[in-house]
Image (tube, rainbow, N blue to C red):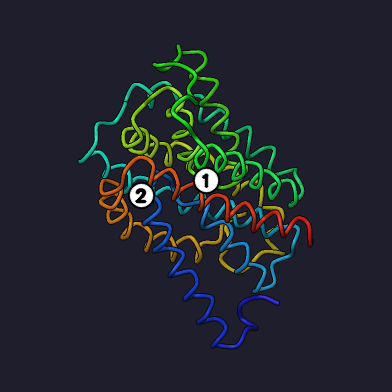
């Protein structure tokens, strides 16, 4: 079953879900300096299941589509933050090449990995991040300043691999890493918002190529593992909502932002853990 065989009311219901997801994605992108992939991936996963995408492919399609959504959303969030907060451009400069290397490695791994491997990667990412954010203490630091070039490059590769496996901008991981070196939370969020496009562009290319052999099993208007209708609908709404999230970020304290982001990640991780256990 694909979308053409669904009744009109169910199609409208699915479109409505994507609209809400787009708005939430934009708010979260601006609020936490992320691309929004962590909320989009679970939503797209459910929508693709409802329209009959094979279970073996729908996580790949959800992750690839999320990376396509991240590009415009992350850029809008980055420029919104740049007008309000000082961004650490040196961090972005050090991470450019390592991020791309990590993304290419991650997309190559994703192309040959079963659906459950991507789900497990998402669960591990969300669980570790939520623990770090919800139970963080001031003593949880590695140093009072950022490390040298090689450790920073290693962080960049790590962020790129994880981001391309689970369909995120890498902003959440980057915020956690920067916070371990006493980078102020608002500066960390603003700086991390700049990672989205660096990760999404090579990630999208990788998922297009990886999904090309499966086009016959994918929904209409899919470009490899990218759903064009899903990406356009969610992405356009998210871009409009991102500046609102950036404004909200400056109305909350550091701890409020950490707890909010931590709860959100815990819920997303729980969702996929349930899918792994019951699937």
Sequence-first disc among 1 and 2: 2
> Which residue is labeled 1 in the image?
168
Q: Which residue is mark 2?
A: 31
Callout count? 2
**Percent x, y of residue 218:** 67, 64
Is 233 placed above or below 199 here?
A: below
Q: Residue at x 43, y 22 (%)?
A: 181
In the rendered image, the vertical position of residue 169 relative to residue 145, given as above or below: below
Q: Secondary structure at mark 2?
A: helix
Q: Residue at x 65, y 74 (%)?
A: 51
Residue 178 % position (x, y): 43, 28
- Dot 2, crowdedness within 10 Å: few (<14), some or many (≥20)? many
Quarter holding the N terminus is bottom right
Foreground: disc 1 or disc 2:
2
**Which one is nearer the viewer's eye here, 56 or 171?**
171
Q: Please tell me whether mark 1 sits on a helix, a strand or a loop.
A: loop
Quadrant of res 220: bottom right
Residue 253 falls in which quadrant of the image? top left
Is 60 situated left or right of 76 in this image? right
Alpha carbon of mark 1 to alpha carbon of mark 2: how far?
Answer: 15 Å
* Image point (26%, 49%), residue name: 251
Q: Quadrant of residue 83?
A: top left
């Amino acid at each position: 079953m694909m979308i053409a065989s669904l009744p009109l009311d169910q199609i409208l219901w699915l479109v409505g879900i994507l609209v809400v997801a787009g708005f939430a994605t934009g708010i979260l992108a601006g609020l936490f300096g992320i691309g929004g992939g962590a909320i989009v991936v679970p939503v797209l996963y459910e929508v693709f299941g409802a329209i009959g995408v094979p279970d073996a492919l729908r996580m790949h399609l959800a992750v690839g589509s999320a990376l396509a959504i991240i590009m415009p959303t992350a850029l809008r969030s980055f420029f919104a933050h740049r007008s309000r907060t000082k961004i650490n451009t040196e961090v972005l400069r050090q991470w450019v090449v390592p991020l791309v290397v990590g993304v290419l490695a991650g997309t190559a791994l994703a192309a040959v990995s079963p659906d459950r491997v991507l789900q497990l990667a998402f669960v591990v990412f969300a669980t570790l991040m939520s623990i770090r954010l919800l139970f963080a203490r001031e003593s949880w630091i590695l140093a009072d300043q950022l490390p040298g070039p090689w450790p920073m490059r290693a962080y960049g590769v790590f962020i790129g691999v994880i981001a391309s496996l689970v369909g995120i901008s890498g902003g959440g991981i980057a915020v956690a890493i920067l916070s371990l070196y006493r980078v102020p939370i608002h500066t960390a969020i603003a700086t991390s918002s700049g990672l989205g496009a660096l990760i999404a562009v090579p990630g999208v290319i990788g998922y297009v190529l990886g999904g090309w052999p499966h086009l016959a099993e994918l929904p209409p208007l899919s470009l490899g593992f990218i759903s064009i209708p899903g990406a356009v609908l969610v992405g356009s709404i998210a871009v409009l909502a991102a500046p609102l999230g950036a404004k909200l970020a400056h109305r909350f304290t550091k701890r409020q932002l950490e707890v909010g982001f931590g709860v959100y990640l815990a819920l997303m991780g729980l969702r996929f853990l349930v899918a792994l256990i019951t699937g």
